Image: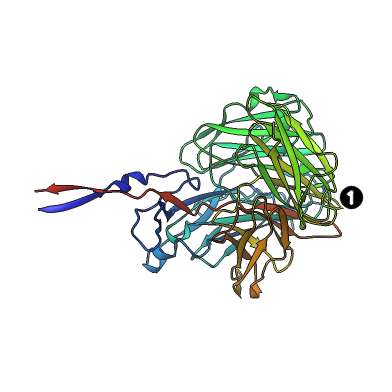
């Protein structure tokens, strides 16, 4: 007789929405983190990431950096399990809402190929490939023809896999630093802080990683509620493709502040907004954390010259919110903002001006004592510089760091980490990876006092060559901590910069322990 064992846990581990596309193995290996009082935490076996098409400018220079930290997936690597992490082009079809190439008079093709038909991206050719945990990889692309990317990681490279896209446009009306974390595919996204104002040109980039078409809807909410638009309904995103949709084609209304809601009727997409201002540069606006009664927006630079808060209230009731700024010495209420009122189904905006006054801070939003529990989404538009030397970045509300998070693209100079601990003191360990071309990792631990924001220049790998990754890990006994990374790349007196929040990388998932095995006997 042959005895074959079917564990209950094998059937329970049908997880497919942890990092957009994730799978795990049954417990029992060295990587399983058993908790006597709860489920074991296991590393995911597969992760998906999507990066939008970088820029419309021929002067754009884009760097892709990808990294998986050492840790939960290493047991498979030690056992000889092969893994891969590859980002490849997602072909971008022309649509009615697709952007035209930049017509900026300062745009020039530095390689003398202007006027030639660009080569169609090969979806089977890797743009950047990661070979092992703990060692970042990078690649570059120039010009406006760089495509959106889609990719996946499996085996020991899947847990915590991160990718960062950083684009520098050095001149012209579109000059800016634009940065975004490549994100997991999903079915629901909120973007407070977008605009259809005359000075703005905002696109929603929708990228479909799957083999079948996805169908998406885009809703717009302004200061008076929903903005009707049939054009935003039933947008088809072909398989393995990316579609950019210009917001001003969805409505004739010119609105300074909008909330964009992207959902899918079928399939899943990656979604991110490219927000461009003719006077104040451009950056990517990533999705806000899921609607909740309280939100945290970490890492407003100390030298911000203008900060604008945009909030949308979801649900049947209005939201009454307390606004607190957590700085280095504690939390306080910005002048004139003891409470703010946001009507149900509407977008409200509040000018905080130069609220940080030389000291980095984080914004904390929570319901007033009698304000109910109305869920909200929120984001900050942050400006540095003045006059014609301005640059803009966005800070959406974010989830806490949780176990671990990674910022994949950092240079020898220009990175700042901001940590805030809203309710209790927090301790985090920061690890600087080796460089893409050489260097030794460095580690440093920081303590964040309750109700404060700590801004630090992170450790840099010794002997650094190339760029490197920063991994943040919440330490045992720590309170919840929220974080962001600012990357400053100033040029010609313009304080060009970008900010990325650092939510949990979802590199592990909780799997309930099986109480017994089902055994069958075969003759």
86 left or right, relative to 449: left
Which color mode does the image show? rainbow
The percent coordinates of residue 456 (x first, y second) are 72, 63
The percent coordinates of residue 516 (x first, y second) are 26, 48
Q: Residue furthest front?
A: 369
Q: Is residue 309 above or below residue 143?
A: above
Q: Residue at x 43, y 54 (%)?
A: 41
* Residue 470 visible within the image: no
129 left or right, relative to 112: left
Q: Residue furthest right?
A: 387
Neighbour class for label 1 at 10 Å: few (<14), some, many (≥20)?
few
38 left or right, relative to 299: left
**As rendered, which of 467 and 415 lies closer to the eye?**
415
Q: Quadrant of residue 439?
A: bottom right
**As rendered, which of 392 and 175 lies closer to the eye?**
392
At mark 1, the secondary structure is loop
| Residue at numbered disc 1 | 388
The percent coordinates of residue 337 (x first, y second) are 81, 39
The percent coordinates of residue 402 (x first, y second) are 56, 53
Q: Is residue 315 above or below residue 362?
A: above
**As rendered, which of 299 and 102 lies closer to the eye?**
299
Q: Residue at x 66, y 37 (%)?
A: 377
* Residue 93 visible within the image: yes
Q: How many marks?
A: 1
């Amino acid at each position: 007789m042959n005895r074959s064992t079917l564990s209950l846990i094998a059937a329970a581990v049908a997880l497919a929405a942890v990092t957009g596309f994730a799978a795990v193995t049954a417990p029992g290996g060295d990587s399983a983190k058993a908790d006597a009082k709860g489920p074991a935490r296991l590393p995911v076996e597969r992760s998906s990431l999507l990066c939008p098409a970088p820029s419309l400018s021929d002067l754009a220079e884009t760097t892709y950096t990808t990294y998986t930290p050492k840790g939960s997936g290493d047991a498979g690597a030690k056992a000889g399990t092969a893994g891969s992490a590859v980002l490849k082009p997602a072909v971008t079809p022309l649509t009615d809402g697709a952007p035209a190439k930049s017509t900026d008079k300062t745009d020039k093709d530095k390689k003398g190929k202007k006027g030639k038909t660009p080569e169609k991206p090969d979806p089977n050719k890797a743009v950047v490939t990661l070979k092992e945990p703990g060692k970042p990889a990078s690649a570059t692309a120039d010009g406006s023809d760089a495509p959106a990317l889609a990719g996946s990681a499996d085996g020991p490279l899947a847990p915590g896999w991160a990718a960062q896209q950083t684009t520098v446009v050095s001149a012209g009306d579109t000059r800016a630093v634009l940065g975004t974390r490549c994100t997991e595919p999903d079915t629901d996204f909120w973007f407070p802080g977008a605009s259809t104002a005359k000075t703005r040109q905002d696109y929603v980039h929708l990228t479909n990683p799957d083999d079948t078409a996805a169908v998406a809807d885009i809703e717009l909410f302004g200061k008076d509620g929903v903005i009707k638009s049939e054009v935003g309904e039933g947008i088809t995103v072909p398989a393995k493709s990316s579609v950019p949709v210009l917001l001003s084609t969805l409505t004739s209304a010119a609105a300074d502040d909008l909330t964009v809601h992207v959902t899918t009727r079928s399939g899943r997409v990656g979604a991110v907004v490219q927000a461009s201002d003719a006077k104040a540069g451009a950056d990517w606006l990533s999705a806000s954390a899921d609607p909740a009664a309280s939100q945290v927006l970490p890492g407003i630079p100390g030298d911000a010259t203008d900060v604008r808060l945009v909030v949308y209230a979801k649900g049947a009731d209005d939201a009454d919110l307390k606004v607190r700024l957590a700085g280095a010495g504690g939390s306080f209420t910005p002048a004139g903002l003891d409470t703010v009122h946001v009507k149900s189904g509407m977008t409200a905006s509040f000018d905080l001006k130069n609220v940080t006054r030389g000291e980095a801070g984080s914004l904390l939003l929570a319901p007033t004592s009698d304000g109910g529990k109305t869920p909200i989404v929120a984001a900050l538009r942050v400006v540095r510089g003045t006059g014609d030397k301005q640059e803009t970045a966005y800070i959406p509300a974010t989830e806490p760091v949780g176990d671990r998070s990674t910022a994949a693209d950092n240079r020898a100079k220009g990175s700042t980490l901001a940590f805030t601990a809203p309710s209790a003191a927090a301790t985090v360990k920061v690890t600087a990876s080796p460089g893409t071309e050489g260097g030794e990792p460095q580690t440093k631990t920081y303590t964040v006092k309750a109700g404060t924001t700590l801004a630090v220049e992170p450790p840099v790998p010794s002997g650094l060559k190339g760029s490197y990754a920063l991994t943040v890990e919440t330490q045992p006994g720590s309170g919840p901590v929220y974080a962001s990374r600012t990357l400053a790349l100033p040029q010609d007196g313009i304080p060009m910069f970008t900010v990325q929040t650092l939510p949990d990388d979802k590199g592990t998932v909780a799997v309930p322990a099986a109480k017994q095995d089902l055994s069958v006997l075969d003759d």
